[in-house]
Image: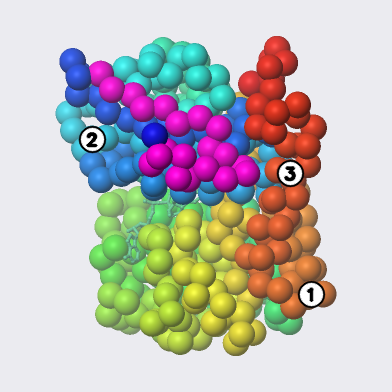
Amino acid sequence: MQDVFSYADELGPGKVVHVYEPSVGLKAILVVDNVAPGPSIGGLRMAVDVGLEECFRLARAMTMKNAAAGLPHGGGKAVLYGDPGMPKTEKERLIRGLACSLRNVEEYIFAPDMGTNEECMAWVKDEIGRVVGLPREFGGIPLDEIGATGWGIRHVAEIAVQYCGFELQGARFVVQGFGAVGKNAARFLAEQGAVLVGAADSRGVIHNPDGLDVEALVALKEEGRGVSDYADAKRLGRDAASDIECEIWIPAARPDVIREDNVGRLNTRLVIQGANIPVTHGAERVLHEKGVLCVPDFIANAGGVICAAMEYQNASEAAALQAIEEKLRRNTRLVLERVRSEGIMPREAAVALALRRVKKVMGLRRWSLFSSAPGFV
Ligand code: NAD
């Protein structure tokens, strides 16, 4: 009891649900953080080592991301205990079981996250219908295939360079994590004339100051090979991506990649956070003091959730890309204008923007978090 309420503050969480069904080994937690703006959208994460605290932090991050993006959705997250690589029949049973047990929790819309994919979302659709991130055949917009988050990063970059005093055309950039987010960001930035000079995946780091061929690298990855298999580049040590001189550095892999102990190695002018929490708050402060602009994760990587929210409204792929472009350009400008005029850190400006939007809708509810109006969720 005390444990659950120890996370509670003025924003939420509004509901914490513990799901347990021993007959099939189902154990899961759902945290619905703040649903003042509307039903929460947040991924279903499947892993062996998740817990309540992590679920709460991830749900809160979605509250901030959805609010900053001006979506009519609050933040939530579900975690399902288990090895995502387990036999498919067992995984399907667990996910269908979880969906059934959450059938009436209308404040939560399922979405994919680590350990789950569009096929898992199709099982949820079949059981309860309330889900995004579906296969195309079910009306879904495959956000990783179309590169929704990378598309957003390109637009963030176009605005952010104006605050850094250099042009995107000819700017050198590095992508740390050449997966769904990273490779698509690379593709869209290269289309704008930026030059990819470094790339890293879990198996290696490559560097060529004259530029890497993005399409050739993407093709390598699609064949299941690593960036180190690219011929025309120098191979560097595992952590060396941070040392590569560039104008734009894009973390698109794991959390906490840049910390106070290694932030001094970065040799760049702009960091655009494609991954979630890739730079610790302490390291963000160091960058700010050095005059390196760092666009926070929940502003920069919101393309994926905007796409999911558009799918929920049955919008087309083209409309989803248009919404990402408009929202991310506007938000980046709003945040960076405040940074420029008040000298505050980008994260402070971004948090203030998200909080202002959440509190505005909370002020329109009789209770702060929820409403009993029909069709509210
Ligand atoms: P992904 O699994 O498709 O790609 C991750 C990439 O990072 C892979 O190429 C992997 O090899 C690489 N990687 C892993 N460990 C690494 C390391 N130590 N050094 C260098 N590279 C490493 O995942 P993704 O969907 O691209 O997501 C990346 C990050 O972005 C995650 O933090 C995710 O939560 C976040 N994110 C994703 C989306 C989205 O739309 N997919 C949206 C918002 C945030």
Direction from residue 68 to residue 264 in the image, left or right: left
Per the image, the residue denoted by label 2 is: 82
- What SS does tag 2 mark? loop
In the rendered view, tell whether residue 355 sits above or below residue 191.
above
Residue contact at pointers 1 and 2, CB within 8 angstroms: no
In the rendered view, tell whether residue 175 sits above or below residue 16.
below
What amino acid type is highlighted by mark number 2?
Answer: Gly
Lower sequence index among marks 3 and 1: 1
Residue 342 - label = 1
Q: Which of 160 and 286 is in front in this view?
A: 286
Measure the alpha-carbon separation of dots 1 and 2: 46 Å
Rendering coords of residue 118 (x, y %): 41, 30
- What SS does tag 1 mark? helix
Direction from residue 93 to residue 218 in the image, left or right: right
* Residue at 23% from the left image edge and 41% from the top image edge: 48
Rendering coords of residue 261 (x, y %): 38, 82
Lower sequence index among marks 1 and 2: 2
Q: Can residue 63 be seen in this view?
A: no
Residue 359 - label = 3
Lower sequence index among marks 2 and 3: 2
In the rendered view, tell whether residue 271 sits above or below residue 51.
below
Measure the alpha-carbon separation of dots 3 and 1: 22 Å
What residue range appears in magenta?
Answer: 2-21
* Residue at 75% from the left image edge and 29% from the top image edge: 365
Graded by Cα atoms within 10 Å as few (under 14), some (14 to 19) or many (20 or more), the crowding at tag 2 reads many
What amino acid type is highlighted by mark number 3?
Answer: Lys
Which quarter of the rendered picture does the N terminus lie within?
A: top left
What amino acid type is highlighted by mark number 1?
Answer: Glu
Rendering coords of residue 237 (x, y %): 27, 80
CB of residue at label 1: within 8 Å of ligand 1?
no
* Residue at 73% from the left image edge and 55% from the top image edge: 353
